[in-house]
Amino acid sequence: MPPLSFLRDSPVPDPSPERLAALYAFTRAQATSNPDGYASNVAWWGQVLAAGLQEGTLGDADGSGSAASSRAGSAFKPDLASASSKGPRDTLVLTVDDGLLSRVTQDGRRPKGLGGVVESLASERSLMRLAAYNALTSGVEQGPGLARRALGAGLGLIGGLVWGKGAPAPEETCWKTAQGRWVHVGNVKAAATSFAAHLAANPPLHHSDCLFSRATFLETFATTAPEAPLTKRDVDVLLLYLQRDVGSVQIDGDVASPLGLGEGPITEADRGTLSVKSTLAAVEAQIEDIESQSAKTMDKVRSSLKAGQKAGAAAYLKSKKGLDDVLSKRIATGEQLRSVLRSIDDAKSNAEIMSAYELSTSSLASALADPRLSPDRIANTTDALADVLADSKEISDAIEIGGAQARQAAGAPEFDEDELAAELDVLVLEEKTAQKERAEREAREAVARKEAEGKAAAARKVAEEKQKVEEKEKKEREERERAARVAAAQQAIKSSEKVAEKTEGSKMTEEEEWAQRHADAQQRQREEKERAERERLEKESQRLPAE
């Protein structure tokens, strides 16, 4: 049996084909006829929904839910690929609608009893309506009260076995009532545990590190979830749980702060610090963009010089100068903002130090009996001194920042045309030098290739001539051997004839002897010519490698 298609790494054991068919076919009516079997089916679907949510495959696509349209009776059937492209899916909020049915479809089958499953999980407090979850004033674990009343108000419409009243409602009624958004309590707890572990492994060191907007909280902690990244809706649910149930995060409007360095309430000063952080992040993004534009403009300068377009290169170079000037201003602004953040963090650290001093007042009072060394008097004096020094530094910083702003407001910078022309001439000279070196290198390589090709051609010619001579010698040798065989045969015939004519005492005539001597002389002359030709070729082949 292949794994469930809508789960990547399912912790749920894969059922047999027959069992899977039963899990997709059962309805709310089984709760009366076979309560144990129904409870087993609900438990299996509870595991599947929890795993699919946590993996980011069953939740609604980042804020694009269809619960409203489903309640209105629309036949909404989203395309899973296009829905995934809209962004990550919720991992803490289960949206029960036709889209969920589409996502859990297996081999063309849709579950028939999902409405009853949601009802049962809600009665077990595994699921809680999002509106009821947001309306809670106490934790989700703190008994009945408002949470149970809000939950019962929704589930009472089903008329099923919730609170043990009456006969189970039809599956169609359960499905209609179950539609909407539900918080998965188990997944919320798992995400809170992962967040706490991440914070323990990466504790914030400064006051500004403890301040987040909801957007920066999502950006910083989205990947701390057990499986898939959190969505904006997940972050809202998690932050509320961390504030109300765990007490590890403070929230005031759009500002969130994990408790740690400063456990006091969020103040306007904290909002200002968060604003400085946001501005610094925007300035850093601008710096990266300007650096990229400057690098691309310099590439255009070089391309124009290679193409011989000096006027275009000068225009691009002037544009780069302007970008560099803006970049230097942005870098200076970023450094000023970092300095402000460092000052704020330093001031907060000093305040904590002073708090420690105040907590040790009683110990100092008992140890120092001299009235002139009273802890209150020391604290007041040091506080006054710190305030005076802080005021002095604030005035100095304000004067420095005001001067910088005045210089910036004086207008755009003016470029020195002589300096621009000199820099352009240097670039032109560098390009010409590079072209000359490239041409000389190519000429040397061409000469070397030509010499190598000439030597190779001469060697091929000698080899071809040698091969021709060898073939000629072989042919002549074969002719000589054939002639020798013919001569031997003729000699044998003549010998037999001489034996036959011996009795007659016949002798070779003078003319035959002369012909034989002439043939021998011709043969020796040919052999002498062949020997001379071989010696000439051997000398030629020895001379070429030496050259």
Image (spheres, helix red, strand yellow):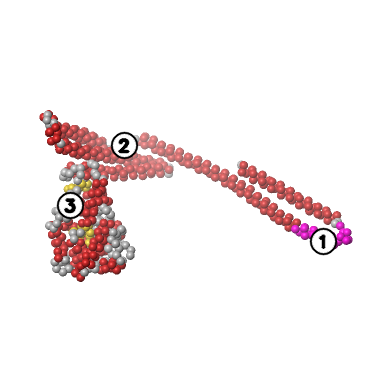
Residue 379 on image: x %, y %: 14, 34
- Using the image as rendered, state which of residue 540 and residue 346 is in the foreground: 346
Give the position of the C terminus as an image quadrant. Answer: top right
* Circle 2/circle 3 CB separation < 8 Å: no
**Magenta stretch?**
485-507
Q: Residue at x 22, y 42 (%)?
A: 208
Q: Amino acid at mark 3?
A: Asp
Query: Any magenta on residue 472?
Result: no
| Number of residues whose C-alpha sits closer than 10 Å to that of mark 1, classed few (under 14), some (14–19) or many (20 or more) | few
Give the position of the N terminus as an image quadrant. Answer: bottom left
Which mark, by number, is residue 245? 3
Q: Residue at x 16, y 69 (%)?
A: 167
Name of the residue lying farthest toward the left: 371
Which mark, by number, is residue 496? 1
Name of the residue lying farthest toward the right: 504
Residue 374, picture quadrant? top left
Secondary structure beneath dot 2 equals: loop
Residue 89 on image: x %, y %: 26, 57
The residue that label 2 is drawn on is 414
- Is there any visible trace of residue 202 in the rendered image? yes
Residue 216 on image: x %, y %: 24, 48
